[in-house]
Amino acid sequence: MLTLATVVLPLLSVGLHHELLVLASNVVRALPGTGRADVGLAVVLALVAHVIEVLVFALGWLVLIRAGVVELSVPSPTLTEIIYFSGSVYTSLGFGDIVPVSSGRFLVVLEAVTGLVLIAWTASFTFYQMREHWMEDTDEGNG
């Protein structure tokens, strides 16, 4: 079960991120001439994508914990604690008061690397949106 999670959760997150960035791009592109607001909307939609991905990993952690495959330093963690743990790992903030105490450490590494890559992808996406939409604003002002 743990091996399956280490394959499925990162792949699912990458696939979701791709589709959600495509959706964000299409939504922004469909808006009529909002200029710089487009970039703000694109960033908000990308942040929503990250929250969804943290929740996907948190759901995976919840299943693994409830199945007794993985144990965290908090006995019987609540869903909120698992989401907090997942968000800390995904964003590579590091461990605080909740840490893995048994198997699952490799999944922690994969979640952190996945989060790092997806956050970098969002930065690239944001840069692209800024170039595309802010240049349009500048071009309209000069035209």
Image (tube, rainbow, N blue to C red):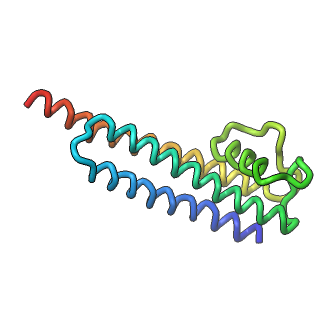
**Residue 99, quarter of picture:** top right
Residue depicted at x 39% and y 44%: 42
Residue depicted at x 51% and y 44%: 47
Position above or below: 60 against 122:
below
Rendered-image quadrant of the C terminus: top left
Q: Where does residue 12 sit, x and y in percent of width and height?
A: 57, 64
Position of residue 132 in the picture relative to residue 63 (left or right): left
Q: Farthest residue toward the right?
A: 75
Q: Where does residue 119 sit, x and y in percent of width and height?
A: 52, 44
Rendered-image quadrant of the N terminus: bottom right
Q: Where does residue 52 sit, x and y in percent of width and height?
A: 58, 54
**Residue 135, quarter of picture:** top left
Q: Farthest residue toward the left?
A: 143
Position above or below: 8 against 134:
below
Position of residue 33 in the picture relative to residue 59 (left or right): left
Q: Where does residue 101 sit, x and y in percent of width and height?
A: 88, 51
**Of 130 and 26, the residue lying toward us:** 26
Residue depicted at x 84% and y 60%: 70
Q: How many marks?
A: 0
Position of residue 120 in the picture relative to residue 130 (left or right): right
**Of 142 and 120, the residue lying toward us:** 142
Position of residue 86 in the picture relative to residue 116 (left or right): right
Residue depicted at x 30% and y 34%: 36
